[in-house]
Amino acid sequence: MVLEYKFDYSSSNSKFETIIDNILKEKNIVYKINREENYIFLYIEDEDDRLIKVSNELSQEIPMSIFLKDFTVEVVPQIPEIDYQFAPNSLKKSYCTKCLTLIEEEGSSHLYDPFLNCSICGTTCSVNNLEVFDGKELLEYKNYEELFKVLASKIAQNKKIRINDYVFSKLDKIKKENEKILCTNLEKLSTLVVGSKQKSAFLLSLEKPSLDFNVNTIYQSQNNCSVNKINVSSAWNSFLYLLSKELQKLEIDFLVYEKSDSFDLELDFEEETQSVKISLTENKIFLLENGDYDKRLDDVYNKFDEKSKSQFLVLVDENELYEESILNIFISSKYDDTITLYSPKLDGMLDVLTFKLPESVNTIFDEIMQSDSGKRLIENYKEKFPEDFEKAINFDMSTLKANSIDSLWKIASAVLGIDNIFEKASGALLQKGPRIDYKLEENEKIFNKEFLLTKFIRSGISFKLAGVDEKTLSLGYVESLIYFLSDLCDEVNESFSLDGISFSGDLIADEFFNKQVTKTFNKNLKQYYNKDFPIQK
């Protein structure tokens, strides 16, 4: 009998194939691996009873991956003729089920050994003698099990321990936004954050990514905490895994970690894993950080000075779109935003839209006041909201570093007296906000149209004067942008017959923002994203 496994695997890396190959090498069974675009096929052949046994073992041994969307298994007549050869992935993996059995099983010669060389996943690190310094004194220990118990007790005593690049300490209270947290006991994760089963499961996947979570309201109220979001990881190597086991026994479920020169104990070992950070939305996983991509893509990225075009060219390369006409939307909290068209017909790229910052808020007000209605609007605003008006005209434009919609939202926030339009929109409870004017100058050309900033600000002032609350108004600003971009894509498509649209930039990976994109954009146009390369480098 022959079983065919079909894995829907969205990454171009060979990590998953390498793991499968290493597992099956130890089972004395006939197998072949094949790959076609985003699908990995595994064929195994043996007598029925033996095949069922191996299949059951595989279900336990093949790790979950953030790139593995789904898989199917079926009986096929025979193993097809396959000429496929993959290059084994040399990056060391975190740890696998075989590792955990060897380091946790009583009587094992590798009990509590964080540095074993595993035939399935390799090893996260390699040392002959691990030296741990308590201040300037060398810490004495009989074996690794005793070492992990000592380290856990030190952390329980509020000692800080530097392990390679990071200093770890017991979580007392969340103190800042996006604080890095190591969860040593995932069963207790819900006491700290608002989560989901899927996000929690991804923390344990092969890649051991970190994810952003919202802090839950119970924790906030009980700890007088105003922080809304933190970044959570689980143990990303076997050393941290074993340390976590001992910390659980002491009921220490969370550690804070950061790069710091302040610590009490320190130890170093060679660590070969790469950090991965992801964002999980309703229907997609976005890579925010990832070291395991084809480094050839760095050369592709460096062909442009503009980050939006660099990112777009990598996306075209990863998805093999060089013969397609694609419109890319790059929305970033850090770099200049650009809507760019790529097509072989154009022999390159053309900007459809870029954003430009004004000299000052006074410049915007002066332009609005060129009409009688605009003059009355500004006078009414100054009279009704004098403090907001005063803060607006004193807004320091030099604090904005990018020509982006994020910068324009910051200007609108300053004018309207809103702390942060994007954050307020994310917390809005209504389904819809008012329609803010995102308008372009009227002319016949498709490319490089001017964005009318005065209408963008003027419409917000009008809604505030009409009594619209700041959360609803903020939602209108974000929601109206999505409608505007969707309409712009349709306009370009009518004139240029697009083969698809693509998205990049870190704001695209935001859960709230991406939800708006998903429900609004034309479903008839195929959508593309980066595969292994981060959505914003």
Image (cartoon, rainbow, N blue to C red):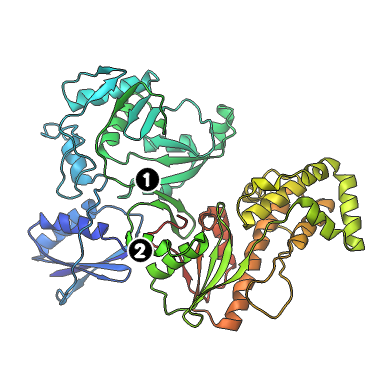
The quarter of the displayed image where residue 238 is located: top left
Q: Nearer the viewer, mark 2 or mark 1?
A: 2
Please state which amino acid type lies under the numbered disc 1. Leu
Q: Is residue 178 above or below residue 13?
A: above
Q: Residues within 10 Å of mark 2 (few under 14, many from 20)?
A: some
Q: Relative to 403, is 273 on the left or the right?
A: left
In this rendering, would 243 be left or right of 50?
right
Give me the C-alpha separation between circle 2 and circle 1: 18 Å
Question: Along the line of sight, which residue is nearer the eye, 48 or 100?
Answer: 100
Is 29 positioned to the left or the right of 216 in the image? left
Tell me the element at label 1: helix
Identify the residue at image location x=65%, y=60%.
479
Residue 10, placed above or below residue 201:
below
Image point (43%, 36%), residue name: 181
Q: Return the residue nearer the eye: 41 or 256.
A: 256
The x and y percentages for residue 345 are: 49, 83
> Which residue in the structure is indicated by mark 1?
203
Counting residues from the N terminus, which is met first, the one under dot 2 or under dot 1? 2
User: The residue tagged with tag 2: helix, strand or loop?
Assistant: loop
Where residue 379 sits in the image (x, y, percent)?
A: 90, 51
Return the mark for residue 117. Answer: none
Res. 32 in view: yes
